[in-house]
Each structure stands twice: as C-alpha cells, then as structure tokens.
Image: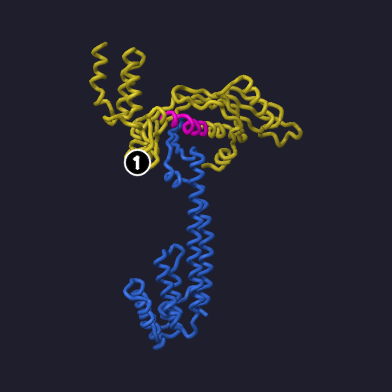
Chain colours: A blue, B yellow
C-alpha cells in the first residue's frame, strides 16, 4: 500500500528548499492538524462515530480520504475485535460525508478482513488440537532431556509445557499466520483502492 | 547444531530395537551394531559392502531425583545448573530420572560384510533372534558420523525406557504421582520426605551397617537430599555401634 504524505511532511520537504510556505500550504497544515486532533479524540474514546461525522462535516473530500486512510493504516492483522470495530465505524462515518459514498462496498471488505482473522483463529485452534492429540498419542514426545556428557536427565512435561515447546507446531503456526497476514494485507489494499477512488 | 551432525542425527534409524527396555532397578548392557555404507562405495561399482561396527553401551541403575538433588551432583555445567536451579525453585517436586551410561569410542569390532545395508541388517537380526539376545540393537548409521547415530540410539533408548518402563513402574510403586497440572512429581511422606529418598536412604543405612558401603557415601546421599539434619542421630549411631 502506498503511503500518503501528510501536508506537514510535504511542507517540511519544501521548507528545506525554500524559506517560506505559501498561504495555501499553511492552510493545509492547519486543516490536517485539526483533523489529527479530532481523530486522536476518537481513538481515545472521547468522541463517538456520530461526533466524528459532525466534526468532519464540511471538510473537503481530500482530507476525508486522508482521515479514512489513517484509520485503515492503523488496522493490523493483530488488531482485536474492539479496535477493528472502532476503525470500521470511523471509516464508515466519514464515508457518509463523501460526495459519492461506497459504504456498502467498504463494509463488505471490512467484514472480509474480520473473516480472515476469524479463519486464522480457527486454523490456529485446529493445529493446536492436532498437536495435543499427537502428544497424547505419543507421550514420548513429552519427555524433556538435559544432557551433560554421559549423564542424561529426563523429565516428562505436562501437555501444556510440551505444546509450548513444540517446534513443529510453532513452525506450522508461523506458516499459517504468514499466509493469513498476506490475505489480510491484500484485503487492506483493495479497501484502500475503494477509499481513494 | 552443526549441519552435518544434524543431518546424521535426522537420518539415523533404529532398524531393530532391543526386546527389553533398560532395567528400572539395576544395570543394563546393550550390544549395538551400527551399519553404514562404506565411504568408498561410490568408487566400487558393482561391489556392495556394508560396514558393521559392534560394541556395548552400559547403563547404571536409573535414579529418580528432584531438581534440587540434581543441583548437588557434580559434573553439570553452569548452564545446566542454571536451568535446574530455576526448575528447583519453581517446581521442586518435579520427577526427573537421571541416567548414567558408558561406552567406549573405540568399537569392539569393525567388519566389512558383502551385501547392501538392508540385507546385512536382516542377517544380523536373524542371528540376534536365534541367539535369543533381548538386549541387542541394529542401527542404520550415517557414514563416518556413525557415533552420532549411536548417540541418537542411546537417547532414544532412554526416552523409550523412561516412558514405557521407568515412569510407569515408579507410579505403580507410589514413588511418583501426577499433580493438578498433569506433571509427574515425587511423592512425599507426612514429614515431607520424598518416598524415593527414604527408600534409598534406608537401603544405604543397611549397607553401611553391614560394611557394604562407606559412611561417607551415605553422608553424601543425605546431603544431596538435604536430609542430614533429620537423620543425623541415626547416622552417628552407626559409629557408636562400631
């Protein structure tokens, strides 16, 4: 996903070349600062999606898109249900302010992102259950060894301990997480395309 | 782990397990046969040979111990002691079995037998069965790293025996039990003394009394279990009687 430069970043780059900013650039910085303040309040639960709608009403499309991208970029594969819901409501509240609203389309993609997370959790749980079954089937895999020369100490790990130390399981979980993360990021890119349209 | 060693470890295979497991209450000796393809095999077209190395690995009697006891044994590195120290603090009752084994790096015999590895293994297996040798093993090794293959066998033999013989027998004798987390822990009497320690110490007192053991060995054992204070009167009594 391409990162969108903020007015401040552009202004900072410009200020290296010329001494002064023109009035339009100054106005853009102010506008972005204002929006950042509103979003910060929203992130801190100080305002609700409806308030967000009221605060951002009348702001040009360009800044609305930037605000939506801010929400989208803060969504990660590790985001919990609450964080996802918060960003989803934020994106949709702003979408209603845009000239052409694609709310249903955006909602669909946001649901898909949530589904990718849910599917990952299901697959993860399945892998853990399979590993548990295997450890129960072959208790020898639960033995931990500590070797020093010709002395070896053996102790049997509990099922939970054995699961924690199961390298094969760790490897499988990493692989599955990688695949789902890729899917998630692809979904985010598609969503960004819709928002930026 | 060195890649070659890891490869040898992963590609070694136990072709015939000994019929018997390691003894829980005595010593064990296993006659091993490590079979490898000769390193020169790629230069000898049409002639198939297998290298057979034979020798013996012996084990002392396995000991049921607590992490605290193991910490007081000589011969463990600082790294191992650190691991044991945290285990001793967090789970002082966790049941561990200490195996001590011995084998010579030099094999008792090395021979070159004609035939591929599988057919030679089959012949040796037949011979073992015919002799009725319940403590013999055949291992498929990897070239010049045959001793790594043997190490794998030694380790596998211990885990197999621990799981199938030592732990179940210790549970049956009431010396260990499961705690609420599903971990095997040593059982203790009403005074908090591990039953296995009590059993061991009683037998050592008896041996010292009959002159079969030096008192200092008994003293070391009492110290390892941190039980000298509790047994000191009986210990000093041994000298009064002498």
* Magenta highlight range: B155-170
Residue B206 spot, x, y in % from top left: 33, 16
Reply yes or no: does residue B160 show up in magenta: yes
Residue B83, relative to residue A104: is it above or below? above
Residue A109, relative to residue B93: is it above or below? below
Residue A150 spot, x, y in % from top left: 46, 30
Circle 1 — which element?
Answer: helix
Given the image, what chain letter belongs to the residue carrying mark 1? B
Report the side of B229 relative to B104 (left or right). left
Q: Quadrant of residue B26?
A: top left
Spot the residue most to the right.
B46
Q: Quadrant of residue B191?
A: top left
Residue B21 spot, x, y in % from top left: 51, 27
Spot the residue most to the top.
B242
Are there few (<14), some (14-19), or many (20+) residues within 10 Å of tag 1? few
**Residue hosting label 1:** B86
Report the side of B121 relative to A146 (left or right). right
**Can residue A99 be seen at all in this image of the molecule?**
yes
Residue A47, relative to residue B185: is it above or below? below
Reply yes or no: does residue B131 show up in magenta: no
**What secondary structure predominates along the stretch shown in magenta?**
helix
Residue under the point 53% across and 42% down: B2
Toward the viewer: A39 or B8? A39
**Can residue A21 be seen at all in this image of the molecule?**
no
Report the side of B116 relative to B234 (left or right). right
Number of marks: 1
Residue under the point 36% across and 72% down: A43
Residue B238 spot, x, y in % from top left: 27, 15
Toward the viewer: B121 or A163? A163
């Amino acid at each position: 996903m391409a990162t969108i430069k903020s007015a401040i970043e552009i202004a900072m780059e410009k200020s290296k070349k010329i001494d002064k900013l023109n009035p339009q650039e100054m106005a853009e910085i102010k506008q972005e600062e204002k929006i950042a303040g509103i979003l910060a309040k929203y992130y801190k639960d100080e305002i609700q999606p409806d308030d967000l709608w009221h605060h951002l009403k009348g702001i040009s499309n360009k800044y609305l898109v930037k605000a939506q991208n801010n929400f989208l970029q803060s969504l990660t594969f590790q985001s919990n249900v609450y964080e996802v819901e918060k960003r989803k409501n934020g994106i949709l509240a702003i979408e209603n302010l845009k000239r052409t609203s694609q709310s249903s389309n955006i909602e669909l993609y946001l649901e898909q992102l949530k589904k990718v997370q849910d599917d990952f959790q299901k697959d993860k749980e399945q892998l853990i259950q399979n590993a548990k079954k295997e450890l129960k089937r072959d208790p020898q895999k639960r033995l931990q060894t500590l070797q020093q020369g010709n002395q070896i100490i053996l102790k049997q790990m509990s099922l939970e301990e054995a699961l924690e130390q199961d390298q094969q399981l760790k490897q499988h979980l990493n692989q599955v997480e990688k695949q789902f993360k890729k899917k998630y990021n692809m979904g985010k890119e598609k969503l960004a395309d819709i928002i930026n349209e | 782990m060195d890649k070659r060693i890891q490869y040898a470890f992963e590609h070694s295979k136990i072709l015939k397990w000994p019929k018997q497991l390691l003894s829980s209450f005595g010593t064990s000796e296993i006659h091993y046969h490590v079979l490898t393809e000769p390193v020169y095999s790629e230069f000898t077209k049409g002639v198939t040979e297998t290298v057979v190395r034979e020798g013996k690995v012996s084990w002392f009697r396995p000991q049921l111990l607590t992490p605290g006891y193991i910490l007081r044994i000589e011969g463990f590195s600082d790294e191992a002691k650190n691991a044991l120290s945290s285990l001793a603090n967090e789970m002082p009752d966790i049941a561990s079995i200490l195996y001590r084994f011995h084998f010579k790096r030099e094999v008792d015999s090395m021979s070159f037998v004609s035939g591929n590895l599988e057919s030679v293994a089959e012949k040796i297996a037949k011979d073992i069965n015919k002799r009725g040798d319940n403590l013999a093993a055949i291992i498929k090794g990897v070239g010049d790293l045959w001793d790594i293959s043997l190490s794998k066998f030694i380790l596998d033999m211990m885990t197999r025996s621990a799981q199938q013989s030592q732990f179940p027998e210790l549970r049956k004798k009431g010396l260990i039990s499961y705690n609420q987390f599903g971990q095997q822990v040593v059982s203790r009497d009403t005074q908090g003394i591990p039953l296995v320690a009590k059993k061991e110490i009683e037998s050592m007192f008896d041996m010292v009394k009959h002159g079969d053991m030096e008192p200092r060995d008994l003293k070391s054992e009492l110290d390892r279990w941190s039980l000298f204070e509790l047994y000191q009167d009986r210990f000093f009594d041994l000298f009064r009687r002498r």
